[in-house]
Image (cartoon, coloured by chain):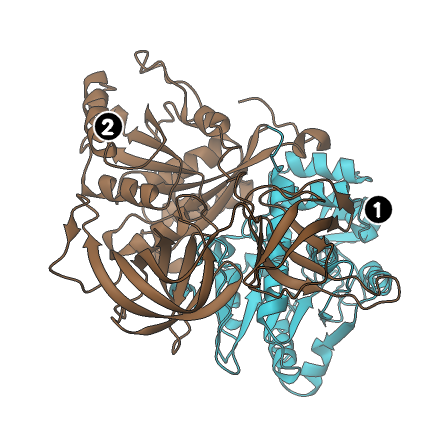
Chain colours: A cyan, B brown
Amino acid sequence: MHYNLSHLKQLESEAIFIMREVASQFDKPVLLFSGGKDSIVMVRLAQKAFWPARIPFPLMHIDTGHNFAETIEFRDKLVSDVGAELIVKLVQDSIDKGRVVEEKGINASRNSLQTTTLLDAIEELQFDAAFGGARRDEEKARAKERFFSHRDEFGQWDPKNQRPELWNLFNGRKNFGEHFRVFPLSNWTEMDVWQYIAAENLDIPSIYFSHTRKIFERHGMLLAESSFLKPVHGEKSEDRVVRFRTVGDMTCTGAVESIASTLEDIIQEVAAARVTERGGRADDKRSDSAMEDRKKQGYF
Amino acid sequence: MSQLDFSSDKYLNMDLLRFTTAGSVDDGKSTLIGRLLFDSKSIFEDQLEHVEEASKKMGGHQMNLALVTDGLKAEREQGITIDVAYRYFATPKRKFIIADTPGHIQYTRNMVTGASTANLAIVLVDARNGVVEQTCRHAFIASLLQIKHLVLCVNKMDLVDYDEETFNRIKNKFDDFSSKLDIQDIHYIPISALKGDNVVDQSANMAWYKGSTLLYTLESVHIASDHNFVDARFPVQRVIRPQSDKFHDFRGYAGRIEGGIFKPGDEVIALPSGFTSKVKTVETLEGKLEEAFPPMSVVMTLEDDIDISRGDMIAKPNNQPRIGQDIDIMVCWLNEKKLQLRGKYAIKHTTKSARCVVREVKYKVDINNLHKIEDDLVVGLNDIGRITIRTTEPLFHDAYKQNRSTGSMILVDEHTNETVGAGMII
C-alpha cells in the first residue's frame, strides 16, 4: 500500500514527536551526550524535530575523564557543526569536591560516580528534563522504562511505581525539584540505530571501526591499555585488531576483535553477533541486577 | 527459519507490528515470548547465560525460557511479571514490538497500557482449562482499546495429547463470546510454547491443523490500513519560528499527522479560531514533501498568517472533528485512589492540556461478562466505566472508534501528578 511508513521511519517519527513534547512541556530540557552512536542519533533527531529552527536545548556531557581521545575530538566537531551549546561536567570535579570517593582496586571505575556528577549538574543548572539515548533492548532493567521516566527529588527511579504510559499521551507533570528522564529511542534496537546511521549517512567516532590498538585481557574482556588502565601482573598487552561497540569510559569498555571497517561491515557484524553490546561492559557484569540497582540511584 | 537478511535496502522497507500478549498466571505467556525470541534468534549468548544461571538458582533442571522476559529483581524472586515490559525482535518481513503485560486480575491497568499502542493482541489459554474469565477479560480489553487483530493461542496442546476436539471446543466457546465484541479479525492457533509446536515451525504433532503458525500470522497480518487515512487531523505540537537570517519570516506548525492526508494546496481550517487557509508546504529537514500521512512528524506552513498555537488543530473545512466540552468517555481507572464524582482532574488530549470535572458515572462494566453495573458506581483501580466529563476548554475530538489518537485522553491527579485514568471517547 502506498500510505505505509517503514518501521525505521515510524521510529523516527515517534522520537521526533517525543522531543517536541519535551521542548513544549518542560522549561529547561537538556540532552545527555556521550559522543556515542545513540547520542549521535539523538542529535540528528533533535535537528529534524525543530528544523529549520535550532535545537532549543543544550547538550551535556558527563565526563569521567577516562575518554577515548577520538570520542572527544568527534564530540567537539559535531557540536560546532550543529551549532549547539555544549556543557561539560567533570567527574574529577565531584571527586575534588569530596562529593564522591574514587573506587579502589584493579577493577576501579568511575562509571557509577557519574551519577552524582549528573544529579548535581541537573540540580545546579535546574534542568527539569534530561534526554537519554537508552534503549529498552539494551538491558533487562531498561525493558520496563517509560519514555517519560519520573525521578523524585533525589533523582531516584522507582520501577514499581511508574506512571502508566498510554497511547502517545505523555504526562510530564511534576513537583518542584523533581525531574524527568526522557528516552526517545526506547523502541529502537541496536540494529535500528546502525541502520539509521547508515541511512542518514552520519559520522561516528573512529573507534567504532576496526583499528590496531594495545589490548590486554581481563575477566574475558578485551580492554584498551591507556594511561588510566594498565595491565597488572600476569596480564599482557599486545597489538590487536579491534573495534568498540560502545564508547563509554575506557576503563570498563571492552573491545571486540573485528575487521569491520565500514558501516555495512558493522551492520553485518551486529546481525551475526551473539553477545549484546552491553555484554562487553564490565559495569554490567558486577551482578545480575547491576543496571537495575544503578538506575534506581539515578544513573543514565 | 531463514537466515536474517540485514542488507540495508531490505531493512529500510520492513514494516512494524506492535502486539500485546495477555494470559492468566501459568498460561505460559512468558514461555511463549521466550520461544519467539529464542527461535527467531533474538536472544544473545550473554542473556542466555543469565537465564541459565537464574534457572539453576531457582532449582530448575532445564533452561526456563520464561526467565528471558522476567526483567526486574523483584519479579525474578517472586516468579511473576509486575509491569509492562517491551521486547523486540525482527524477521526479514517485519520488526515486532511486544508489550508483555502480566495476567493477574489486579493488573488490568497494565493490560490497557500495553494494548493502547498495539495493532494485534495475542490471548493465551491453557488447553486444559479452556476459556476462563480472564480470557474474556483480555479479549474485552482488546476490543475496548480497538485492537483490530486478535490471535487466540490455545497453549499446552502437548498436555492434551494434541487433541483436535479440545481445540475445537475452545475455539467455538471463544467464537460465541467474541461475537459480542468489536474485533474485526480473529485467528485461532493450537500451540505448545514449551515444545515449540506451531510457534515458529509447523507442528508435526497436529497434522489436523491446516492454518498458519503464530510467527507466520504475525508476519502476514494486514496492518497497513489500521490508521485512519480519511479524516485529516493535525494537532499542533509546537510553533516553529527560527527567526534566523535565512528563515526570517518562516512560521511553521510542528506536529504529527493523526489522520487523513495533507497536501500542499489543500484547504484547511484551524481550530478553535475557525480561520481557513491553504497548506503552503509540508517541510522536513530532508526537503519538502508532496503529501503527509499518519504517523508522520512534519512541519506544515500555511498560505496565510493566522493565529495558531500548541493544542490547536488543523483539519479540513468539510471534515471537521467534533468540538465540545461535554464529553462521554469509557474510562479505565489506573489508580488506587478512586475516581471522585464531581472531582477535578487535569487532562491531556492530543497536544492539548486542560482540566475537567467528572459530571456523572453512568455505569460500570463487568469485564467478565460485559454486563452493565448500575447499582455500584464507585470506580476504583482496574474498573472500567462510562462517565461524562465537562472540560474547561472545548476539545477537538473524534470517537475513539474512528481515531485512536484524537479519541483518547488521560486523566491526571492534580495533587500527585499521577496518570489515574485512561479515557476513550464514545
Instruction: Specify the amino acid type for callout 1.
Output: His
Q: Which mark is residue A271?
A: none
Please indicate whether residue A134 sits to the left or right of residue B29 in the image.
right
Name which residue lies at 56% across and 32% down.
Answer: B94
Rendered-image quadrant of the N terminus of chain A: top right
Secondary element at tag 2: helix
Q: Which residue has dot 2 on it? A: B175
Please name the residue that numbered disc 1 is placed on. Answer: A211
Name the residue at 29% across, 53% down. B108
Amino acid under disc 2: Asp
Are marks 2 and 1 in one subunit?
A: no
| Residue B324 in the image: above or below residue B166 | below
- Residue nearer the viewer, B284 or A41: B284
Q: Is mark 2 in CB contact (under 8 Å) with mark 1?
A: no
| Residue A176 in view in this figure | yes
Residue B103 at what x, y percent from top left? 29, 47
State the residue lying farthest toward the bottom. Answer: A97
Does residue A13 appear to the left or right of B304 in the view shown?
A: left
Q: Does residue B48 appear to the left or right of A2 in the view shown?
A: left
